[in-house]
Amino acid sequence: MVCKTPVKVKDPTTGKEVEIAPEKVWVLAPKGRKGVKIGLFKSPETGKYFRAKVPDDYVC
DNA sequence: GTAATTCG
DNA sequence: CGAATTAC
């Protein structure tokens, strides 16, 4: 499944804030804790992959 | 450290 | 197989 909804994230490769759709989103949570949603993004500038938190209410 | 995911 | 991601 490819995500469509863009998310505002800081691109660590450029330092710029970009609005892009994550290629994949999943929940990263230890047992007994709430955890966070993580998205896998590809920088439009550099083409490098990076992971960043996505809002808890984000739907792919 | 833990959780899942996947790129390098 | 390790890094990196968040926050508890």
Image (spheres, coloured by chain):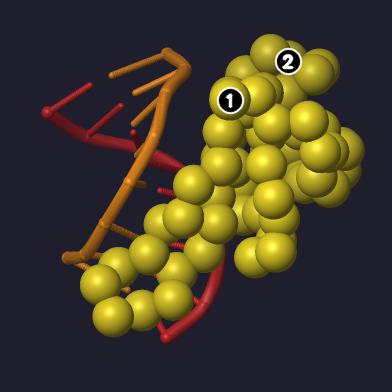
Chain colours: A yellow, B orange, C red
- The residue sitting at 61% across, 54% down in the picture is A53
Q: Residue at x 65, y 24 (%)?
A: A2
The answer to whether A54 is drawn above or below residue A56 in the figure is above
Q: Is residue A3 visible?
A: yes
Residue located beneath label 2 in the image: A46
- Identify the subunit bearing mark 1: A
Rendered-image quadrant of the C terminus of chain A: top right
Q: Amino acid at mark 2?
A: Thr
Q: Nearer the viewer, residue A22 or C7?
A: A22
Whether residue A12 is situated above or below residue A54 in the rendered picture = above
Q: Which is more foreground, mark 2 or mark 1?
A: 1
User: Quick check: can you spot residue A16?
Assistant: no
Residue located at (46% from left, 55% from top) = A27
- The residue carrying pointer 1 sits among few (fewer than 14), some (14 to 19) or many (20 or more) residues within 10 Å by Cα, namely few
Residue B8 position in % (x across, y down) = 42, 13
Which chain does tag 2 point to? A
Above or below: residue A49 compared with residue A25: above
Report the side of A15 relative to A1 (left or right): right
The residue that label 1 is drawn on is A1
Provide the secondary structure element on which disc 1 rests.
Answer: loop
Q: Residue C4, position in %: x, y? A: 46, 43
Going by the numbered disc 1, the residue's amino acid type is Met
Q: Find residue C3 and report its horizontal and vertical position in percent.
A: 35, 38
The image quadrant of residue A15 is: top right
**A56 on left or right of A21:** left
Displayed quadrant of residue A18:
top right
Q: Observer-nearest residue: A25 or C2?
A: A25
Q: Would residue A23 be found to the left or right of residue A21 on screen?
A: left
* Residue at (38, 64) in percent of width and height: A29
Residue A52: assigned label: none
